[in-house]
Image: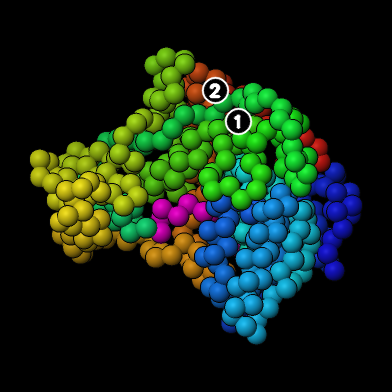
Amino acid sequence: MTLSRRSFLKGAVIAPFILPSHIWAAETKPNSLLTMGFIGMGKQSRGLLGGFLGNDTKVLAVCDVDTTRRDNAKKKVDDYYAKKGGMSAGCAAYNDFREIIGRKDIDAVCIATPDHWHTYIAVAALQARKDVYCEKPLTQNIHESVVLLHAVDRYRRVLQTGSMQRSSKEFRIACELVRNGAIGKVQRVECSFGDPGVPCDLPEEPMEPGLDWNMWLGAAPGRPYNSILSPRGMHDHFPHWRKYREFGGGMVTDWGAHHLDIAQWGLGMDASGPVQTLAPATPEAKRGAKLVYANGITVEHKDGFGVHFFGSEGEVRVNRGKFVFKRGDETIASYTNSDEDRKVTSCAAQVQKAERAFLANAKIKLYESKNHLSDFLDCVKSRKKPITSEQVGARSAICCHLLNLTYYHGQPLRWDPRRLAFRERSGKAEWLTRDYRRPWAV
């Protein structure tokens, strides 16, 4: 039986993440298909659904506040099982994520909602003893990162963040080169991504029936509908809600969550983080803020290649399908996806060239994942930490949030990565969180 919206909501007003023990999902049985529910069925989730379908999973339910997207996802699942034959999942379609959370027969959930919903849904799922695959950035603010870290520990579930770059070889080899001293002592890092978030000032638009706008807003401030935030129907682009501070954090938390995550990996800071941020030279600047680590290394937000590591003896540049490794004046490997490069080589060939030359006897070997979704499923079975666990996802998100706070408030910040709090006489407590619209407080 499902948990009713009324009973869930009644509990949520007092303690948002407390679910009655009788709805906790059972432990995943060894060698059985993992039963899954999908929450948020936009462009990103359509790709995830296709990736998980048939990959030792059985999809039982989908959820979206938009009728068209919800029905489309259900049809996709039903059509898949109909063509396969003999394995009909009878996919359910819900408007309210609590219907999925309350099902005892669902082992894991995939969350691909707008950012402002990530943490509430993820923690509710963890409390219901479900494993979680949640898109990046894992959280919408620093407070939520801390909550999720504690929740995974408390409920002992597996959580994978959708920071898929760690499952691409060019990023892993770039970080292994850095970690094994192939560019000498690391001096600084540059990461390229777009602007920080801005306040939402979109005008009201008429809305066609079929969208639960109040539910789409969730904890965010109440505001009139605008199609830029939630385009109706089966749009094929990533909506621009991510530009606005009420729902995301601009490109700092969008692409920044990818590239700052790789910077953290290359610097060996997955269990820690920066100790300070520096503001850009001018208050209105949208580039130039820096993360500063205890060893003096800086990670600067600026336009460039993607992720660029500078060392005393060389440099490594990496982006999706692009890889450059230099030592001194010598280029060891290079693929920038130019017309000339495509005629003579490939990214994989150049990555392999660097790997064979400098990592054959490497002392540090990083976690190798060849497929991000399969890594999650493997870890659900083994109960090990996946490649982008809650520690990775939450701390990389904190890097993004710290940069945004520096842009928003125009001042440097001092941070304690062990306590996950501002240091004395730095920042304000209210900057770590947001004003939550009840009953969706985290």
Q: Quadrant of residue 98?
A: bottom right
Of badges 2 and 1, the one in the foreground is 1
Q: Is residue 231 left or right of residue 319?
A: right
Residue numbers of the magenta segment: 157-167
Give yes or no for residue 13 being in the magenta stretch.
no
Examine the rendering and report whether any part of residue 305 can be seen: yes
- Quick one: label 2, few (<14), some, or many (20+) residues within 10 Å? some
Q: Is residue 221 left or right of residue 153?
A: right
Q: Is residue 311 left or right of residue 22?
A: left
Identify which amino acid the numbered label 1 is placed on.
Answer: Arg
Q: Quadrant of residue 328?
A: top left
Identify which amino acid the numbered label 2 is placed on.
Answer: Tyr
**Residue at which label 1 appears:** 245
Q: Quadrant of the C terminus?
A: top right
Q: Quadrant of the N terminus?
A: bottom right
Outermost residue, left direction?
329
Residue 267 is tagged as: none
Asked if the residue at tag 1 contacts the one at tag 2, i.e. Cβ–Cβ closer than 8 Å, the answer is: yes
Q: Residue 283 appears at what percent x and percent y? A: 47, 15
**Residue at which label 2 appears:** 408
Q: Is residue 392 or residue 303 the one in the foreground? A: 303
In the rendered view, would you say 201 is above or below 119? above
The residue that appears at 55% across and 20% down in the rendered structure is: 409
The residue that appears at 34% across and 56% down in the rendered structure is: 172
The residue that appears at 78% across and 44% down in the rendered structure is: 209
Total numbered badges shown on the rendered structure: 2
Q: Secondary structure at mark 1?
A: loop
Examine the rendering and report whether any part of residue 298 can be seen: no
In the rendered view, would you say 3 is above or below 135? below
- Quick one: label 1, few (<14), some, or many (20+) residues within 10 Å? some
Q: Secondary structure at mark 2?
A: helix
Q: Residue 107 appears at what percent x and percent y? A: 67, 69
